[in-house]
Amino acid sequence: MAWWRAMCRRRLSAATVSILRRDLRSCPHLPHGIGFSPPPSRVFSGFVPLSGGHRFAGGLRRIRHLCPFFHSRPWDGSPYSTVSGNGEASACWNCGKPAPPRGPFLSCEACRAVQPVDSSLDYFQIFGLEQRYDMRDENLEGKYKEWQKKLHPDLVHSKSEKEKSHAAEQSARVIDAYRTLSQPLSRALYLLQLAGIHVDEEKIVMDPELLAEMMEIREAVEETNGHKELMKIQCQIQKKLEDWSNIFQEAFNKREFDSAIVATQRMRYYERAVEEIVKKL
Amino acid sequence: MLRAAGKRLLGAGLGYRASPDAVVTAGAARGYHERVVDHYNNPRNVGSFDKNDPTVGTGLVGAPACGDVMKLQIKVDKETGKIVDACFKTFGCGSAIASSSVATEWVKGKQMEDVVSIKNTEIAKHLSLPPVKLHCSMLAEDAIKAAVRDYEAKKANVNGSKEASVGTAEKAANA
């Protein structure tokens, strides 16, 4: 009888172990710190080994309590959800801690593992900013450096290939985001892109006023050699850039996209002129 | 999928010299085609005509993608409608400068009706422009057309005002 009971338990144990293995793999929300301690570089490999029949029942009860597959159990008081605000499943691939309910999930707070790139996140979301053109008070550079402290590939050189590739892609994306948002023209074009407006860059510009003005400016830059004079011209062009930058902002906010596109064209020409001056200086 | 992307990234970094893309890149890195370099170092017909001169047509065009500006001017013999001289001034990359330089060479000595049929593909072929620089040749084609249009418009204005002044003179005479 005792033999039969032991056999049952062992068989049950084996069956349940395999079910649990399956469940644990499919369950992204394993609460962390309940005595599982999975090794950081492998996923779900460290579930409690159910050894010995005499601990079986207790073990199962403990796991049943902990594994959300059997019944939902809020963790930290917040409801489980497999979906973050960004529309993708979010819990750390490494330790299983759920992503914070708000904000970009680029690296895990708990185990510091770098997460795979979520391309549904736009560049503004990466820095926790509203989709706005005005960036004056946002300390973009500070936020960028904060991210790189967590994501830089140099920090993962001893980790797994998977994490290295996450870090490479994630940090490249953050660099792109920073570069795009820090310059007015690229920020303007990115906003237009997010709004679904396609800017046809192939179309030849024929606006005689703008072109004549640009011709004059470029000729002046070419002929001027003095440092002071060049700085003066640069100042004037920077002012025009600012003016057209404001025109863009107004037009974009009013959703007058044609005017917004014209503003970006102007900005491009002025930026180009500034580049030439800087080269000369 | 991410692992594959990661491998591709690493592969691209390590196997740069070996991959087929690298051959193309090396080709481009060897530099512009010699004709482009020639036109850049020895540009033909750089200069400016007086745009108020009635025999001059001025074409001013720009490329929004790169902020280039191209000015192409033609001097036309009003009796024959033949382009007797041309000049250009371009602020842009080597390909844009070369394209406009070639354009001024090609329009000299031709009839105005003929030059409007010069195609950007011919210019691009002559300079062996890579695909990414095709828009420079497009700019040159449009500059030629704009110059011709400008000349025609000027001519029409001049004729119009001539007729008007003849009309006023007649009125004055009849009055």
Image (tube, coloured by chain):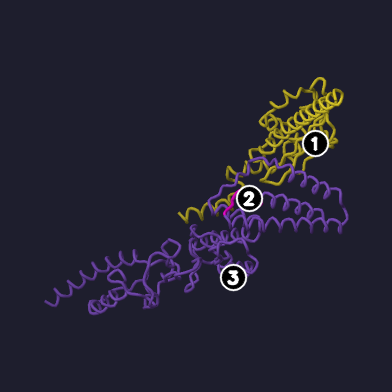
Chain colours: A purple, B yellow
- Left or right placement of residue A190 versus residue A53 in this view: right
Disc 3: CA contacts within 10 A as few (<14), some (14-19) or many (>=20):
few
Whether pointer 2 and pointer 1 mark residues with C-beta atoms closer than 8 Å, the reply is: no
Whether residue B146 is visible: yes
Q: CA distance from mark 1 to mark 3?
A: 51 Å
Mark 3, secondary structure of its residue: helix
Q: Which residue is mark 3?
A: A146
Residue A146 in the image: state x and y as whole percent.
59, 70
Residue furthest to the left in view is A1
Residue B101 in the image: state x and y as whole percent.
78, 34
Chain letter for mark 1, please. Answer: B
Identify which residue, B157 or B99, lies in the foreground.
Answer: B157
Q: Which residue is mark 1?
A: B88
Chain letter for mark 3, please. Answer: A
Residue visible at 66% across and 56% down? A247
Picture mark count: 3
